[in-house]
Image: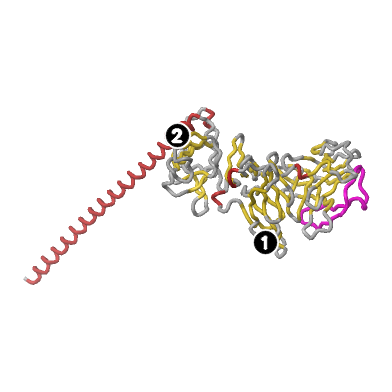
Amino acid sequence: MKVASAAQICFVLLLLNLDRTICRTDIVPGHDVTLAVPAEYGEGFIGRAFLIETEHLPPPNFRAALTVEATQGNFSCSLQVFLGEVKVWSSGHFSRFFTAEKCVLELTDDGDLRLKGPTGHVGWRTGTAGQGVEKLRILRSGNLALVDALDGVKWQSFNFPTDVLLLGQSLNVATHLTSFPPNSTSFYSFEIQAQKLALFLNSAKSKYSYWEFKPPKNMNLSFITLNTDGLDIFNDQAMKIAAIPSGTAQPLRFVALGNKSGNLGLYYYSPQKGIFEASNRALKTTCDLPLACKPYGICTFSNSCSCITFQVENEGDSSKCSDEISGKFCGGIEGEMVELEGISSILRDAPNRVNLSKRECGNWCLEDCKCAAALHYSGGGDGGVGGGEECYLYRLVMGVKEIEKGMGFSYMVKVPKGTALERRKSGLKKWVLAVVGVVDGLVIVAVCGGLGYYFIKRRRKNLILRDTTNNS
């Protein structure tokens, strides 16, 4: 194993919160860096070697690091870029490279940048062998690049965006930002389409938008670029046609797609607080976030979550607020639709049909075993097109929120057949028991009152007779 000299590269192994040092040199071919991987798994472990940083810039600077992290019961190995303490790029964003014993970053003699494990297995590479690579550099923009002797870029991290768009970086229709919520099979994406920018919730083979920005006059757009004042939108002729403003006088540093909320934020650095803060966000309220509540949850007017509850046959009075039911209807379980009043969905771009009645909309969902819910719109409210009837199908019950009644929306959830009937029976039983209880109570009160009146009257009569006898 070759180890670079101190003049070429230096690094410090960062374990959790230990102090760190930074180097200001490039990495050249023929050298590698190794981080040891612990023998035993420890939740929260982070081992990090900072390699290079941008020079002659006011803090916070960009820094590149080799990182070992404990995740999913294993240790992942990745090359990462940081702006201050914020991770803005990672080689393991889409596919993690899991390793044991050691994590090796190698820039080979022929110019290929690789991540390797203990047996030499390559888990990630740039594929730049034989292209005249002279060094690995981190540019003032935060772009991690392999360059040749004339500083021509042979590979760059800007061509492989993750969940952050940096100042001066561009995105076009072929690239997008993605983020992955913890403990979820779904993921978010921020995409540039022909006539709009949009945020999407991606789940299995389904894709739903939950925020859109359209340039005026239905202009076609080609790419976007972040500058210090906002997010600029350009057409095919590289003419600026629209912008999303920063919302602050402070210069912007990056745009990020949050992995927990799925919200898109424009961020600036606050020197007073020493942190990055969002000056503008695409979504302003909690209930407009796609995963504000867990599956089968409703985001209410108070921005809290309420479960969609129903009674499953032969399961007593247990309530459901999970995705346990979705997907079971393709296994032979017969379903029926339960309508929820004052409820709608923030998810758009779902499969839809027009001129369908509410009943036909529900039947369309029942015919599709993968359908979990349906949204029917009727009338000239905010959500319709042309005032007609529309029906939308969903393969998941998420992005559900409370709305004012009378807006023309009907949200229907598919449940096992008999569920709704059982619920109505349960309600009827409770009503009958309540009425019987009230009647029984009135009867008991009447009987007790009558007996009390009888005994009181009899006692008074006996007292009168006793007094009369004594006076005689």
Identified at 67% across, 50% down, the residue is 232
Three-letter amino acid code at the position of disc 2:
Asn
Pointer 1 local density, CA inside 10 Å: few below 14, some 14–19, many at least 20: few
Asked if the residue under mark 1 is in contact with the one under mark 2, i.e. CB atoms within 8 Å, the reply is no
Label 1's element? loop
Residue at the top extreme, as displayed: 332
- Is the magenta region chiefly helix, strand or loop? loop
Pointer 2 local density, CA inside 10 Å: few below 14, some 14–19, many at least 20: few
Label 2's element? loop
Residue 209, visible in the rendered structure: yes
In the displayed structure image, the side of residue 239 where residue 409 appears, left or right? left
**What are the residue bounds of the magenta stretch?**
1-30
Q: Quadrant of the C terminus?
A: bottom left
Q: Which residue is mark 1?
A: 249
> Is residue 270 highlighted in magenta?
no
- Residue 403 percent location from the top left of the image: 47, 48
- Residue 280 percent location from the top left of the image: 63, 55
Residue 278 lies, with reference to residue 313, above or below; the image says: below
Three-letter amino acid code at the position of disc 1:
Ala
Identified at 79% across, 60% down, the residue is 58
Q: Quadrant of the N terminus?
A: top right
Q: Which residue is mark 2?
A: 355
433 or 118, nearer to the observer:
118
Q: CA distance from mark 2 to mark 1?
A: 49 Å
140 or 463, nearer to the observer:
140
- Residue 105 percent location from the top left of the image: 84, 43
